[in-house]
Image: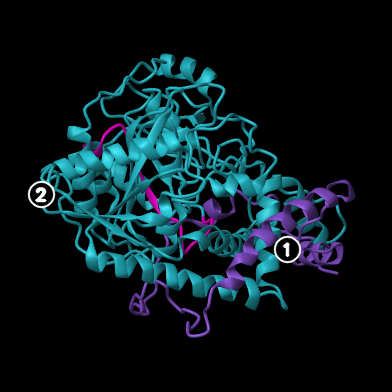
Chain colours: A purple, B cyan
Amino acid sequence: MITKADLENVAGLARLKIAVKDEKDYLAKLSQILDYMRDLAKVDTKKVREPVDIFKRNSVARADKIFKSAISQKELLQNAPAVEGGQIKVKKVL
Amino acid sequence: MADIAKIKAADKKIGAFVNFKNGSKNEPFSGAIKDNLVTTNLPTTCSSKMLEKFISPYEATVVQKLHEAKLNWIGKTNLDEFAMGSSTENSAFGVTKNPWDLTRVPGGSSGGSAAAVAAGMVDWALGSDTGGSIRQPAAFCGVVGLKPTYGRVSRYGLIAMASSLDQIGPITRDVKDAAQILQIIAGRDEMDATSVDEPVPDYGEALTGKIKGLKIGIPREYFGKGLDPEVKKKVEEAIKILEKQGAKIVPISLPHTPHAISVYYIIQSAEVSTNLSRYDGIKYGYSDNRGDNLLSVYLNSRSQGFGAEVKRRIILGTYALSAGYRDAYYKKATKVRKLIRQDFDEAFKKVDIIATPTTPTTAFKIGEKADNPLEMYLSDVFACSANLSGNPAISVPCGFDKNKLPVGLQLIADHFEERKLLNAAYAYEQKRGFDIEYPKFV
């Protein structure tokens, strides 16, 4: 069960706005999914340690050398909605 | 490959493609690419309004490798938005139809890729599989779909959905073609730290069709409640064909299977919620800058750019990771994931291959599950475990139900045992005793 307050809190954290008309639908569907997931509580995991790497791979550290990207600044900025002086333009923070 | 004009005409009925490449030529062995793999010469939309106009400044490693192998591809295929869905109905650019029955879904999320191969528009297509998204549509469309071992194929340039589960693989009409495409795309890539430095063996050479003495495990958890009797019958017949060729059939148990869907949808949603935080209306993608501060740009761009299912999963994942709920959901799911992985590790001490149905039913009707996300999620019940455990798995057509809809046999192997997996699938394919007459569209 997920409450309206939970939904508002989580949507805020996720930077999403849920329209008032859609709240009921979100709550009903999310509650149904979360109720189904309750079956996990039945699994005994007392002796299971939270895995760090499920695939048991060794460290993938590599030599710390500078890698020159083939992508130019112009190409990187081509999809930005607002650019000024070679930089991405944003609205005021506050 | 058929004439490009005919393919475009056929696509008006099927809706497999999001974009066609300009000046596509009629070359033999042409393919298509799922539209969540970045390309520099066509937009990469992820079938989302969020990326409708996005043109990547770089190309995915798999796309570069296809280019180096001189393989031609003609366009980008439709998917559920950001690969979230099992029916290719959640696309901002229209629903893809199943070529076997245009009133039914092709499965998803690589539904466009599977439909394009089944309809004869292309000989091969690339898909991505996070919880069955190659194998489930392959089963629904009567084609072969291979999810390689996690780390076998570079994910560089695959737009991230759930990074610990995503894997790229081929969809083809037969096992030999799947082996050929895997040969091209497999291997370690400096640009993907999770790609593994394992030698890439010759997959074509492994296709001997000889499986005498091969031990095939049949997990009882995959043949119980919820499995359509017609699907069950076809899969059991397929297992008999493998047995006739000398394979040894071994009953096994994968005891944590009933929890796979819960584990999968918690971990996947959690990873979705973090991966998709990059879409903020600032750097690229859909942007609504009408508000008067930065926060309003984030809120408006994300709320309008994403579709309903994507938003639902972001919220679910954020919830599962949030203070007060993390232990009960995310942490618990990662522990049970470990148990699911152990189930497979134990099983592969006893057997070489595991055989199951790919899906519990054949293709369902368009709209049938569209408003019931939990029902939709359950269509991945047999496929998602192999993503949680990282094992390679393949779906091969194994017959038809009374509505003439294809049924898929799923084979699973131990990590990096794609040779064994492909050969078992090939051995079945050679002896299955029927030819597939694909519907004619081109």
Q: Quadrant where the N terminus of chain B lies?
A: top left
Residue B53, percent from left and from top: 61, 40
- Characterize the local packing of mark 1: few (<14), some (14-19) or many (20 or more) Cα atoms within 10 angstroms: many
What residue does disc 2 label? B212
Say which chain tag 2 marks.
Answer: B
Determine if the magenta segment contains residue B175: yes
- Characterize the local packing of mark 2: few (<14), some (14-19) or many (20 or more) Cα atoms within 10 angstroms: few
Residue B334, percent from left and from top: 52, 72
Asked if residue B366 can be seen in this view, the reply is yes
Q: Quadrant where the C terminus of chain B lies?
A: top left
**Amino acid type, callout 1:** Ala
Residue at mark 2 to residue at mark 1: CA–CA distance: 54 Å
* Residue B9 or residue B394, whichever sits in front: B394
| Residue plotted at (54% across, 64% down) | B263
Residue B115, percent from left and from top: 44, 29
Is B328 on the left or on the right of A31, as rendered?
left
* Residue B225 or residue B194, whichever sits in front: B225
Is B222 on the left or on the right of B176, as rendered?
right
> Mark 2 falls on what kind of element?
loop
Residue A29, percent from left and from top: 73, 51
Q: Quadrant of residue B323?
A: bottom right
**Amino acid type, callout 2:** Lys
Could you confirm whether marks 2 and 1 are on the same chain? no
| Residue plotted at (39% across, 68% down) | B341
Q: How many marks?
A: 2
What residue does disc 1 label? A14
> Mark 1 falls on what kind of element?
loop
Determine if the magenta segment contains residue B195: no
Question: What's the magenta region?
Answer: B160-176
